[in-house]
Image: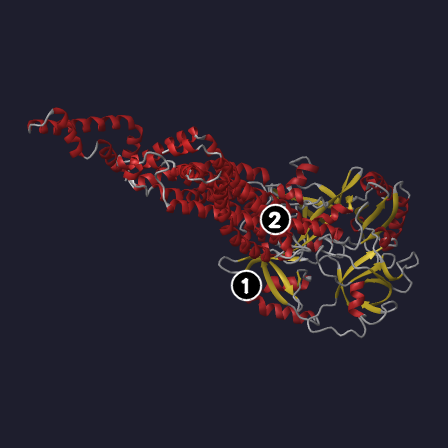
Amino acid sequence: MVRHVLATLRNLVRRTALEQDLDAELAAAIDALAEEKRRQGLPAHEAVRQAAIEMGGVEQVKERVRDVRAGSVIDGVWSDARFAMRLFARQPAFALVAVATLALGIGATTTVYGWARRTLLEPLPGVPRQHELTVFAMRTPDGEFETEMGTADFEQYQRSQRAFVGLYGSRFTAANLQLPGEAERLWCGLVTGDFFRVLDVRPARGRVFGPDAVEATDGGPVVVISDALWRSRFHADEGVVGRVITLNGTAHTVIGVMPPGFVGGKPAIALSFWAPLSAAEPIARDRLQPDEVYGRLKPGVSITRATADLAPLAQEVEKASGRAVLRTLALFPLWQVPGGGSAAILRPLIAILGAVVGLVLILTCANVSSLLLTHAVGREHEMAVRVALGAGRWRLARQLGIESLLLAAAGGLGGVAIAHASSNLLLAFLPPLGLPYGLALGLDWPALGFAAGATLACAALVGLAPALIATRSTVLPSLNAESPWASGGRRRTTVRHALVAAQVALSMILIVTASLFLRSLVNAGTLQPGFDPKDVLAARVDLGPSGYSNREGLALFARLLDRVKAIPGVESATLASRIPLTPFNRDSTIIAVDGFIPRDGESLEATLAVVAPDYFRVLRIPMRAGRVFSPDDVAGRPLVAVVNEAMARRFWPDRDPLGRTFRQDGRTFTVVGVAADVKSYSIGEPPRSGLYLPALQEYWEYMYLVVRTAGDPNAVAPAIRSAVRAVDRGLPVADLQALTEYVRLAFLVQRVGGTVLGVTGVVALLLAALGLYGVVSYSVWRRVREFGVRMALGATPREIRRLVVGQGVRLFAIGAPVGLVGAVGLGLAARSQLYGVSFADPVSFGAAIVLLAIVVVTAAGIPAWRAGRLNVVRALRNQ
């Protein structure tokens, strides 16, 4: 092996000398053989000719010698690559179109792959082996999932489980960091002690807290901060470890700084610091139990096995809880987290985009393969000469394969550039909700590896058909042909036509899907959410971190409303615990209604909003019956509520709901009003039961300040900030923006799908037009003499044009039905993301058929117009 490697390197370095030695040896051999022929009586020139024939051909012998020489493959590949580069340099337009087409397909596929991996498969930057992490959830009898777990239940699971390396619980909340002269609202993770061990992450500076129940420094609570916070607020001070900072008015000691890139254990959210959940009362007050529980599976343990192992323990925990309705345990990987997390929102969208860009990649490969096939047929004479000179079929296939590989490699580099430019495009669709998005969407080594794999796959796909066709060339007919029209065959034409028909089918699928999403986006924009978000400004005001009591909090909210209502340009203002159509506010409650008997497994859950007077007027939610809340609905007065129409229909279908009562948390409320239904979580959801409680009776420490303005809501934003500082200088104002920005996330799937699929639909049209134009043009080029004969026999230019256009129409008639079937399948898979439009929407299908038909006729009409203008004499002479 060593000798072979050394010989290969020596032959590659001494290539010119070896070729000279080979020429000298062959010349000497032919001279010796010719001398022997001359001694037999042959003339000198005949002796040389006979010697060369007996030798088997000089070039053929050279090829055989090169094939057995050490390093011949590398040398041959390099020679083929240089020839391919010279060929493309002579035909730059052909090479540019092929490379740009492949770059488009590879770039789009790599981009969506990066999105899928970073949002679903590895949503926690800086955390190793994320496929081992699982999420705990409890399935209710009606099929809903609850991720919140009581502290006692969590500790029992932690003690008794055997399938996991460890478990940790976490809670996602906000806290105020006191800075000189102001306070900044930060997002933090309140986690159990095994958090860092289970995630297998280590601090860059200092240390982290461990599994002990409570950990403190000099009697005070501790925190671990993120690298981003360390750099932005502490200016990368190396002495930050041991420093005391003030969170929610309480001193905390910084014990560690996490490494760059680590943003925490909450998918898609970048947290600023972490504190022990067991000692987090200054931050979370009474919210000291985990709302999410994660575990890392032991090596070799699957989710199915872990679920089975924990099933008896889960039954024991549920029975000990005393719940009337028992739940069952379910474990999920990170990409399947239940609820309204990023995975649940993005998973269907990523799946649809993945299918679409896969079709785009196949479409680009078919297009380039068609181009290469046409190019290869034009090189039949060259291939025949190569075969006549001794090149084998494998040698020809290698040459064409290297040409395809070079085109694909250039397209792969272009695709990487496109993926780099578009990798963060998803973030542009996310509204600025005041949450620090923790999505790391840039290119990395796995994405580059995927791009390399896609490049190799494209090289194989685009080069297969041309290589098979070109290497089956028959030598004598190709060499004897007097014109390029004399060769060719039905097989080659069939392959080219099949490729174009496939492009038509794929284009039909993409255009129909894009049309469905665009129509869905338009319909979603016209759907009535039940409230009016225009000219409304909203901001989150959280009194919990500041330590206000209920009475003090109510007084502060009252002063704040008075100041805001006095701002010029403000029509009205109110407070609310949640805003409709925002996925991060999913407050709900369980109620009981006298006389209503639920079915087995039926949930009595209703959405809950605590609102101040004027709430319905600010959001322009119509009242169907009764009254709204008034300043008289205060603590100490009878408890009242406003319900929505869905709740009234469900619990009092044949009775007047006004004056009816229901129980919630052991208290009895009287219905005083019925409001119109509003969309709570998504624009396409069915009406769900919902109730409103007065803020003066049901104090909540975190509220949204909702303000209706007479003009541009952003114009009064500075005045609102000043009003908040006037009532409490240390109170931060978070997420201050127009309400239309809040509800943008409800249309995320439709906006991303409509935009991306719209672009891919246009690209598909262009590729289909290019492929069809190339095939029809080539067909016209090969049939010039035929058209000349037809015209000489009396055919009119119109008949010639109809004949050429008919070829394109036939390809459309073959590909379109296949595409329609595929479009129905993809639309059926995406039907849950479509609003106001069926997966088999006739308008979308009809528009796609008409649009693609126009493109087909246009693409075939250009060469048809040229064919109708042929000069008969020149066409007949063109042989």
Q: Position of residue 371 (x, y in %)?
A: 45, 39
Please report contact status of discs 1 and 2: CB closer than 8 Å, yes or no: no
Residue 201 in view, yes or no = no
Answer with mark 1 or mark 2, whichever residue precedes in sequence. 1
Q: Residues within 10 Å of mark 1 (few under 14, many from 20)?
A: some
Q: Residues within 10 Å of mark 2 (few under 14, many from 20)?
A: many
The residue sitting at 76% across, 51% down in the picture is 282
Name the element at disc 2: helix
- Mark 2 highlights which residue? 514
Q: Which mark is residue 306?
A: 1
Residue 8 in view, yes or no = yes
**Above or below — where is 600 with respect to 803?**
below
Judged by depth in the image, the label closer to the viewer, 1 or 2, is 2
**Above or below — where is 799 with respect to 138?**
above
Q: Residue 456 versus residue 462: which sits nearer the camera?
A: 462
Q: Position of residue 244 (x, y in %)?
A: 72, 42
User: Residue 787 falls in which quadrant of the image?
Assistant: top left
In the current view of this chain or complex, which residue is farthest to the right? 632
878 sits to left or right of 328: left
In the current view of this chain or complex, which residue is farthest to the top? 44
Q: Which mark is residue 588?
A: none
Q: Position of residue 807 (x, y in %)?
A: 47, 45
Measure how far apart labels 1 and 2 are at the Cα level: 41 Å
365 sits to left or right of 317: left
Q: How is the image coloured?
A: secondary structure
Count of labels in the image: 2
In the current view of this chain or complex, which residue is farthest to the left? 40
Question: Mark 2 belongs to which amino acid?
Answer: Ala
